Image (spheres, rainbow, N blue to C red):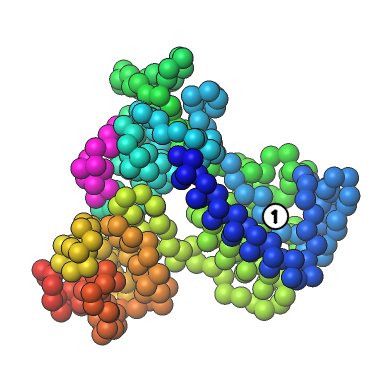
Amino acid sequence: MNVVNKYRDGIVDRLFKGLSGLVASKPITVVSGEGKLTAPKTVTVNGDNYTGANVILATGSYSRSLPGLEIGGRVITSDQALGLDFVPNKVLVLGGGVIGVEFASIWKSFGAEVTIIEGLPHLVPNEDESLSKGLERAFRKRGIDFKLGVRFAGVEQHENGVVVSLEDGTKLEGELLLVAVGRGPNTAGLGYEDQGVAMDRGYVLTNERLQTNIPGVYAAGDIVPGLQLAHRGFQQGIFIAEEIAGLNPVAIDETGIPKVTYCEPEVASVGLSEAKARETYGADNVSVYEYNLAGNGKSQILGTAGFIKLVRRNNGPVIGVHMIGSRVGEQIGEGQLIVNWEAYPEDVATLVHAHPTMNEAIGEAHLALAGKPLHAHA
């Protein structure tokens, strides 16, 4: 693990230095320290006050736990997991969402025995159900165990490990318990509520222009309700800068933001799930198509299994692209363009996709949905 951690830290360090260099090359003042909003447009850091015409709140998030579940010892969050210098022999993961399945996947790759505990009926429950089921099949083949639809009751720590109790009476043993039940907004004690910023369960409320209820005060990133993704916060920062500059940028459509879960196989999606699409437009007004990657030459070369699922409005555009398979996160960029530009399957079917690439699978899927299947069953 020391070699892995050194490699990771080296990449992070290079990226940080590059970003720091960009900031230093601009007329930007960087103040290091703990800050607090002490007036609607004033931030106090280390006893010094900084006042601006506009303030952007972007204080990120922290690893959540469950009520009564204390973090410490052999009960850890992703923050501590990233600092481990060893691979646990047997690990229990509480939470089958993005964080949980990513850590379960990497630990299994390193040789650990892994069991995931998820209270909802499926892994990655915020994804299209087809992707959830596909990931469950893949994890079974890899030997990753999971308990679905059963709730956590408690944990006992001892010298050599932990014993987790579930509400159905099941007891599970492991060397560590990773608590991966999501992330919460990092807003407590920062003066937001004291200055009248509208909040809801710790999140900062904004309108579609990312403005809070206080004029000139904006918020971005994980403290704003919605997807907690780095690229969402990145885009929100650009949006706010352009808004303050008077450029009148187009509001960000959350539905059009791509999501990627970095496990093996990867899960990637953008747009509406099949269930959400049928709820929104009516069950009879939506069509779906699943293209199996077994029909893709490059996927066979790489030994990759999975599928691409398309969701469209009947006689209308594609409104959802969902994928599972190795490296499909590298393909979701085209899916994002298709959904955000409201492309019809017939539009995408005319585009030439390079051969042999995994990207061909997107073209093949749209050919099939447009009624022109080649390497797929209609």
Residue carrying label 1:
57
Residue occupying the far right of the picture: 48
Q: Is residue 297 above or below residue 200?
A: below
Whether residue 40 is visible here, answered yes or no, is no
Q: Nearer the viewer, residue 121 or 207?
A: 121
Q: How crowded is mark 1: few (under 14 residues within 10 Å), some or many (20 or more)?
A: some
| Secondary structure at numbered mark 1 | strand
Query: In the rendered image, which quarter is residue 122 located in?
Result: top left
Residue under the point 74% across and 47% down: 192
Residue 195 in percent (x, y) is at: 79, 48
Residue 276 in percent (x, y) is at: 34, 57
Residue 150 in percent (x, y) is at: 32, 29
Query: In the rendered image, which quarter is residue 210 located in?
Result: bottom right
Residue under the point 30% across and 20% down: 170
Q: Which of 163 and 123 is in front in this view?
A: 163
Magenta-colored segment: predominant secondary structure: helix
Q: Is residue 219 above or below residue 25?
A: above
Left or right: residue 243 compared with residue 128: right
Residue occupying the far left of the picture: 377
Asked if the magenta segment contains residue 141, the reply would be yes
Residue under the point 23% across and 74% down: 356
Left or right: residue 279 compared with residue 231: left
Asked if the magenta segment contains residue 79, the reply would be no
The quadrant in which the C terminus is found is: bottom left
Q: What segment is highlighted magenta in the picture?
A: 133-147
Residue occupying the far top of the picture: 158
